[in-house]
Amino acid sequence: MDLELKDPILIEGLPGVGHVGKLVAEHLIEELEAELMIEVYSPHLPPQVIVLDDGTVKQVRNEIYVHRGENRDLLLLVGDYQSATNEGHYELAGAFLDLCEEFGVKRIYTLGGYGTGQFVDKPQVLGAANSHDLVEEMKSYGVVFQENEPGGGIVGVSGLLVGLSRLRDIDAVCLMGTTSGYLVDPKSAQEVLRVLSKALEIEVDMQALEERAREMERIVGKLREMEKAQMPFETSGEEDLRYIG
Amino acid sequence: MDLELKDPILIEGLPGVGHVGKLVAEHLIEELEAELMIEVYSPHLPPQVIVLDDGTVKQVRNEIYVHRGENRDLLLLVGDYQSATNEGHYELAGAFLDLCEEFGVKRIYTLGGYGTGQFVDKPQVLGAANSHDLVEEMKSYGVVFQENEPGGGIVGVSGLLVGLSRLRDIDAVCLMGTTSGYLVDPKSAQEVLRVLSKALEIEVDMQALEERAREMERIVGKLREMEKAQMPFETSGEEDLRYIG
Amino acid sequence: MDLELKDPILIEGLPGVGHVGKLVAEHLIEELEAELMIEVYSPHLPPQVIVLDDGTVKQVRNEIYVHRGENRDLLLLVGDYQSATNEGHYELAGAFLDLCEEFGVKRIYTLGGYGTGQFVDKPQVLGAANSHDLVEEMKSYGVVFQENEPGGGIVGVSGLLVGLSRLRDIDAVCLMGTTSGYLVDPKSAQEVLRVLSKALEIEVDMQALEERAREMERIVGKLREMEKAQMPFETSGEEDLRYIG
Amino acid sequence: MDLELKDPILIEGLPGVGHVGKLVAEHLIEELEAELMIEVYSPHLPPQVIVLDDGTVKQVRNEIYVHRGENRDLLLLVGDYQSATNEGHYELAGAFLDLCEEFGVKRIYTLGGYGTGQFVDKPQVLGAANSHDLVEEMKSYGVVFQENEPGGGIVGVSGLLVGLSRLRDIDAVCLMGTTSGYLVDPKSAQEVLRVLSKALEIEVDMQALEERAREMERIVGKLREMEKAQMPFETSGEEDLRYIG
């Protein structure tokens, strides 16, 4: 591809816990009016099409959008699904890193949620980076680095992009908004976006996310009342709740 | 292959929900006296042979039949199973699309059932297409396009052929007869066939499907009586019912 | 390999239902004093070694033994496991058929058990073949061909060798001894061996199998008494019983 | 790699039952101040990074350390995980054996635990080797070879390295400390280390392992008291206990 990019940064926001990363990346695409640059199809994604409201279909895929900024360009990686197989995570992460090398990307932000298992009043942004310098830099934006968090490591493309980028001399950090893990969480996404905006030195209107957050607050409020009224969630119910919003 | 085909159209009817697509495609093969053209063997199909009534075996496979029509030829894709793996769905769909390109196929119909979870009195034919023009054309044949239906997208070869064909400039539409999802459903298949006949501008005798439909009506009638008599189905029982007929 | 074989026939007896095929093939190897010719290692077999009684290990594998007969040679395919993956079944069956072509094998017998779910007093030998002529020939040895049996087809290497051999112009038949499916079944193996001996026009001493069969009779007798005494098997128990003997 | 090694021996201690092998190999790395020589990344390992206490990440991998001894060098194979797939076990074991051939390794020790299902007061070291001579030699160091133990064979890289090394003319033995299988077991690791030290003719300070063993003794003591007080473990609880320590 003969695409000239200016000091580009990759921001990954594929679906995951609380859809936090996805909310942030899609919000950025909308607010920055980023343009679709690359479609990524893979046999490691589910064998599926999505039916859109107008009756047309969209083959399940990952997408990279580009925003041409004043000082530098942003690449935004979003999509319908992550890989459905372990090996596929490696294959796709490898393909994304190949593109990073091709475009001269020197820094990657991967965005996600960190499930705490309970409703989170004031979401924090936890971090994990592939260098000490980056850890220190991220602390200055308010990112929290806690021993033993996240305990289970980081699974999927958000983890691999940070872990494997070290072998290619690319700086990378994963930013995780704390969230219950039961619901799509625009409030947690707001916190991640706040930190990311500082790091990127850009200003982003947050109104759309704020509105979605208020809406979710109402839903969460009702769920909590129900909880207090001793109507316990069934385990199988939580699975569904995760996709409300 | 040095096979000359006249303006060919591919019709896919591999096994799926209610075996609706399979019933339609196999009915067409019989009524149109289509001939077996290609056998597709794949390690992504189950490692299995089927034992026929005369004691001989048939290796599990997919098959493409050809019907030489007056104005155009039809290719009919049927088989014993779909791929047993995610990646296999992509591999087989890719192989089928390669054949489409080789034979100059410009349009694909994929046929299936859409499980509603309850007995359907008047089956509808839902659609999903890979272009706006095709959506409009299909509406003129009575195909229903509903927002959020099918909600989970379309999984398997019926979905992939419609989703991936766009990348090869082939028109494709999936026609789904609504059906309970519990039983083989020749009544739903009749509705799909009715729409498909209009689209293909062919006339097809439906008697065989009608007879199977009447037979199923009797079975469904009995099941419903049993239901009213409060003999609830066991979940595991439904699995078996799916293959009655 | 520069191995000259005389009109060779392949007999497959890998582990399966009731270990019927395995018992027959291993009995033949012992009685005919067949020699180990080829060891087959594959990443599709379980990642495992077996520890022998003397403390040494044996890498899980498939093996082909050769018996040099007066009129023709026999190749006997046995092993510790079948493939652990669907694709692996195809890969290994393909490798075995490659060897068949290389050695000029013109006929394959695959041996197995057919689980009936209940104790079988007089085991039958069911058959499935890849040509009508072979069906007729097998009937003359007492093989039973029943409509709709086996209903679920034949899964694994015993099925694939019969199904895929047709594409290579090799005659192949699967002989299945009926068996409960709960226990290793030397009695069923005896019946299969009786039929196979007729087909191969060889005489094989059956004493070893008869002794194992009598031993199993005693175990089965006790199990039946327990059953009558209304001590129902637990489902999970049957799994273990399958490997007694 | 142009690395000259002196009569090297490979010692494998990847995670497994009771983390016995891992404890021994990591203890050796620390006591012998072995140096990291090779990092092994693979799509067959889980798609994951581990977050370290300082906020930086470590891509899940296997590692080979080298200790340059007086008479011979030791290669120590450790890591975060074993392969997540069957085929991956074969692929990684094959890669390790390729390295062994490249470096002239003539002997391999694979270390693991053998789960007995109950608390073990006096752990034994069971063995399985790829030659009779090696069985005899190991007996002289106190390794126990028991008929039918381990009954299920040896699964994973510890098994494959011993099983597949025979095909490359490398001596290999698996040493397994008996352990409950419920808890990380430094006491069992001590026994394995004792045997291994004799075999390697090296002296290793065991204090660190002894301290961890005493700590675990206290935990096990408490668990046993709880058991006596008739507070039965829940099955799901054991899973967690496995990682205490």
Image: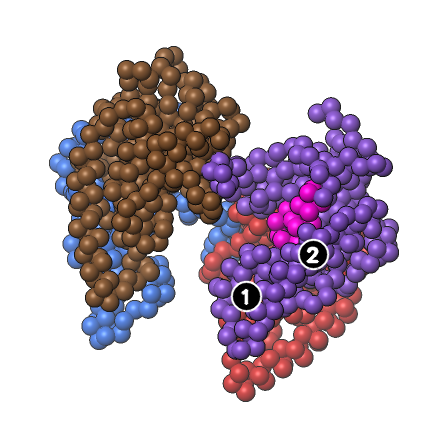
Chain colours: A brown, B blue, C red, D purple
Label 1 crowding class (10 Å Cα cut-off): few <14, some 14-19, many 20+?
some
Q: Position of residue B226 (x, y in %)?
A: 24, 72
Q: Chain of mark 1?
A: C
Residue for point 32% across, 54% down: A118
Q: Quadrant of residue A22?
A: top left
Are dots 2 and 1 on a single chain?
A: no
C160 lies left or right of D168:
left
User: Residue drawn at (20%, 49%), measured in percent from left and top?
Assistant: A217
Residue bounds of the magenta highlight: D14-30
Q: Residue at x 43, y 43 (%)?
A: A146
Q: Residue at x 58, y 64 (%)?
A: D219
Rendering coords of residue D154 (x, y %): 67, 54
Q: Is residue B100 visible?
A: no
Q: Is residue A167 left or right of residue B150?
A: right
Which secondary structure lies at badge 2?
Answer: helix
In the rendered image, which quarter contains the N terminus of chain B? top left
Q: Chain of mark 2?
A: D
Viewer-side residue, A15 vs D244: D244
Closer to us: B61 or D53: D53
Q: Which residue is mark 2?
A: D210
As for residue C30 lying within the magenta part, the answer is no
Residue on which the image places disc 1:
C115
Q: Nearer the viewer, mark 2 or mark 1?
A: 2
Q: Is residue A181 left or right of residue D123?
A: left
Q: Which mark is residue B42?
A: none
* Quadrant into which the C terminus of chain B falls: bottom left
